[in-house]
Every structure is written in structure tokens, then in C-alpha cells.
Image (cartoon, rainbow, N blue to C red):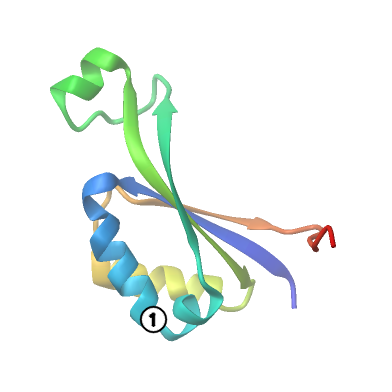
């Protein structure tokens, strides 16, 4: 089965809700995930606050999961049903290689 990464970008305010969902989800909980803070820049951004508009950037979190291609779409649909927030974006990318350095 093809390996993929699912990346979610979301407002920091949704971190706890997303973490709770992912830990309780059978697929996501088994896969595990990482979270990091990130900053998005760009003219096409939808700023949610005056501070973001003035600063020209959005502070957010990125959640990344390593999955197989067959489980990613159903997980995205479960997330959509549970969270249903248009400020959360997702991206699935094929993993061409991975491994350890040891």
C-alpha cells in the first residue's frame, strides 16, 4: 500500500479539539502524529484577526500523520464531521521513501 502523509493546518485555538479527536480515532491514534507551530504568509490568506492583518501572517499549528493511502480519505471525512471548521486545511502527499539512519 502506498505511504502518504496527511498534514493539517489549523488555528492554535483548535489544537486541543484536534488532539482529542486524533487520539480517540482508531486509525490516527494507532499511527501517531506530530504537531508544530508554524507561520503562514501570503496574499491569498484569510486573516482571522486584526493582529494577523496588521502582521501579514497567520500563526497556526501543523499536524502531520504518516498513513497508508487507503485510510487517509476516510480519516479526512471523520475529521470534517467532528471538527467542521473551514479554517482547517489538509494536504495528502505521497511518500517516495522513508527509513531510519541507524
Q: Secondary structure at mark 1?
A: loop
Give residue 44's position: percent from left, percent from top: 39, 25
Give the quadrant of the C terminus: bottom right
Left or right: residue 25 compared with residue 14: right
- Determine the residue located farthest toward the left in the rendered image: 50
Vertical position of residue 87 compared to residue 4: above or below: above
Q: How many marks?
A: 1
Give residue 18's position: percent from left, percent from top: 31, 63
Vertical position of residue 12 compared to residue 67: above or below: above
Q: Which residue is mark 1?
A: 25
Left or right: residue 1 compared with residue 84: right
Vertical position of residue 57 compared to residue 23: above or below: above
- Determine the residue located farthest toward the right in the rendered image: 102
Residue at image coords 34%, 81%? 24
Residue at image coords 39%, 81%? 25
Q: Quadrant of residue 1?
A: bottom right
Give residue 22's position: percent from left, percent from top: 38, 72
Give residue 93's position: percent from left, percent from top: 64, 55
- Determine the residue located farthest toward the top in the rendered image: 54
Residue at image coords 25%, 61%? 16
Q: Depth check: 16 or 1 in front?
A: 16
Left or right: residue 51 compared with residue 77: left
Left or right: residue 25 compared with residue 34: left
Residue at image coords 61%, 60%? 5
Mark 1 Cα shell of 10 Å, populated few (<14), some (14-19), many (≥20): some
Q: Quadrant of residue 96?
A: bottom right
- Determine the residue located farthest toward the front in the rendered image: 102
Q: Quadrant of residue 38?
A: top left
Amino acid at each position: 500500500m502506498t505511504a502518504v502523509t496527511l498534514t493539517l493546518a489549523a488555528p492554535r485555538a483548535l489544537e486541543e479539539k484536534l488532539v482529542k479527536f486524533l487520539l480517540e480515532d482508531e486509525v490516527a491514534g494507532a499511527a501517531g502524529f506530530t504537531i508544530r507551530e508554524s507561520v503562514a504568509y501570503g496574499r491569498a490568506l484569510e486573516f482571522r484577526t486584526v493582529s494577523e492583518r496588521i502582521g501579514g501572517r497567520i500563526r497556526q499549528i501543523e499536524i502531520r500523520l504518516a498513513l497508508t493511502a487507503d485510510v487517509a480519505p476516510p480519516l479526512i471525512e471523520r475529521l470534517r464531521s467532528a471538527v467542521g471548521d473551514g479554517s482547517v486545511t489538509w494536504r495528502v502527499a505521497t511518500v517516495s521513501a522513508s527509513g531510519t539512519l541507524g
